[in-house]
Image: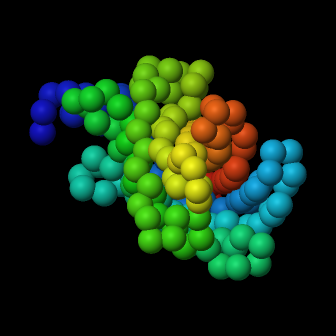
Amino acid sequence: MSGKLEQSKKDGAHALLASMVGEWRGVARTWFEPGKLADESPIAGSTRLVLDGLFLLHEYEGALQDAPMKGIAIIGYSLAEQQWQVSWIDSVHNGTRIMHSKGQTPFSLAKKGSDPLSVIGSYPAGEGPDWGWRTTLELRGRDNLVITHYNITPDGEESIGVEIDYKRVV
């Protein structure tokens, strides 16, 4: 293991990922239009380190408007690129597509809690240009993990799409 990775696992980005490991329960809120809450449902998630602590695997189950929903995200930090990276799949939002997102949130800001881990991807929105999809992960204290997804129009307007507010149970 490289010295940089060893240090990151000790007190860097990989240590931050390790601090998010656990079993989680909470509520998922979904908006299809800005300012109009469309759904609020229970959600259960599990996070664990994989590949010797290189990545955080997030698996979750819940419902969206009474329809079952499952998903998986792999979250990592590329030391070479100094960049957060996420690959996300789920049974409702993405169909058969894998969404890849990346971001430039400096680890130092995410560590201090002044700026959550943040990545941006995109998705096709029918006819016309793709829309952006920004995801943030924020550990608000040891036992509260908030994952927020924002829609970004082709014109750059951003509005909340999904918020998962987890409490650690294990």
Image quadrant where one finds the C terminus: bottom right
The quadrant where residue 141 appears = top right
- Quarter holding residue 84: top left
> Who's the residue at 33% across and 50% down the image?
55
Residue at image location 27% in from the left, 29% down from the top: 81
Q: Residue furthest left?
A: 1
The residue shown at (70%, 79%) is 67
Tell me: 56 left or right of 128: left
Work out whether 10 lies above or below 114: below
- Above or below 107: residue 61: below
Name the quadrant of the N terminus: top left
In percent of width and height, residue 127 lies at 58, 56
Residue at far front of view: 127
List x then y, in percent, for residue 110: 50, 27
At a point 52% along the width and 64% down the height, the residue shown is 94
Q: Is 34 in front, or is 86?
A: 34
Q: Nearer the viewer, residue 79 or 144?
A: 79
| Residue 124 in view of the camera | yes
